[in-house]
Image (spheres, rainbow, N blue to C red):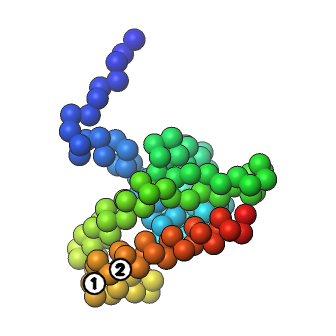
């Protein structure tokens, strides 16, 4: 039996949890774009395969980043929401966004991306707090509707 090697530091542990191609994109969609259904994630512009999406959602749930709301027990009623741990990744998402928008030709960005860039550059902390508050409001409305 091969023992699984433990991460050697906090950064290595974080990369193990968040460092694949899809995890932060799913968290971005949940927190910034308020997506909560499998179908909504599936049709994001990055076109994640359904088997990979299923695996990432399970992993995010197992590690406490998201929780599953399943009011009627059917796949169609299932919603995914970020936990406080999931929302705590927002600064990472913003920093990656800042890195990319500072190093990418603006002609490659769409209108939405340019708007987010402008909002972040106008005040990163304000942007983060507004997005957290908007997401919390969204989750409260979602839970109240169920």
Q: Residues within 10 Å of mark 2 (few under 14, many from 20)?
A: some
Q: Residues within 10 Å of mark 1 (few under 14, many from 20)?
A: few
**Residue linked to disc 1:** 123
Q: Is 53 positioned to the left or the right of 103 in the image?
A: right
Q: Is 87 positioned to the left or the right of 70 in the image?
A: left
Q: Position of residue 71 (x, y in %)?
A: 74, 55
Residue pictured at 79% horizontal, 53% vertical: 72
The answer to whether residue 83 is seen in the rendering is yes
Q: Position of residue 123 (x, y in %)?
A: 27, 84
Distance of label 2 from label 1 (alpha carbons): 6 Å
Q: Is residue 86 above or below residue 43?
A: above
Q: Position of residue 143 (x, y in %)?
A: 65, 64
Q: Is 53 positioned to the left or the right of 63 in the image?
A: right
Give the number of marks: 2
Residue pictured at 27% horizontal, 73% vertical: 98
The answer to whether residue 38 is seen in the rendering is no
User: Which label sits on residue 127?
Assistant: 2
What secondary structure is found at the residue carrying circle 2?
A: helix
Residue pictured at 60% horizontal, 63% vertical: 36
What secondary structure is found at the residue carrying circle 1?
A: loop
Q: Is residue 30 above or below residue 105?
A: above
Q: Are marks 2 and 1 in contact (CB under 8 Å)?
A: yes
User: Which label sits on residue 41?
Assistant: none
Q: Quadrant of the N terminus?
A: top left
- 97 or 32: which is nearer to us? 32
Q: Quadrant of residue 51?
A: top right
Q: Is 139 positioned to the left or the right of 94 in the image?
A: right
Q: Position of residue 134 (x, y in %)?
A: 49, 76
Residue pictured at 23% horizontal, 46% vertical: 11
Q: Quadrant of the C terminus?
A: bottom right
């Amino acid at each position: 039996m091969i023992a699984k090697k433990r991460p050697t530091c906090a950064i290595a542990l974080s990369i193990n949890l968040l460092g694949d191609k899809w995890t932060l994109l799913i968290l971005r969609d949940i927190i910034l774009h308020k997506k909560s259904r499998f179908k909504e994630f599936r049709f994001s512009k990055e076109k994640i395969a359904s088997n990979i999406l299923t695996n990432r959602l399970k992993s995010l749930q197992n590690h406490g980043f998201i929780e599953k709301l399943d009011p009627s027990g059917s796949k169609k009623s299932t919603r995914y929401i970020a936990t406080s741990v999931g929302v705590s990744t927002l600064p990472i998402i913003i920093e990656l966004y800042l890195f990319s928008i500072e190093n990418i030709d603006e002609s490659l960005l769409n209108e939405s991306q340019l708007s987010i860039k402008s909002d972040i550059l106008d005040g990163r902390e304000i942007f983060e707090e507004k997005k957290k508050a908007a997401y919390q409001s969204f989750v409260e409305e979602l839970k109240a509707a169920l």
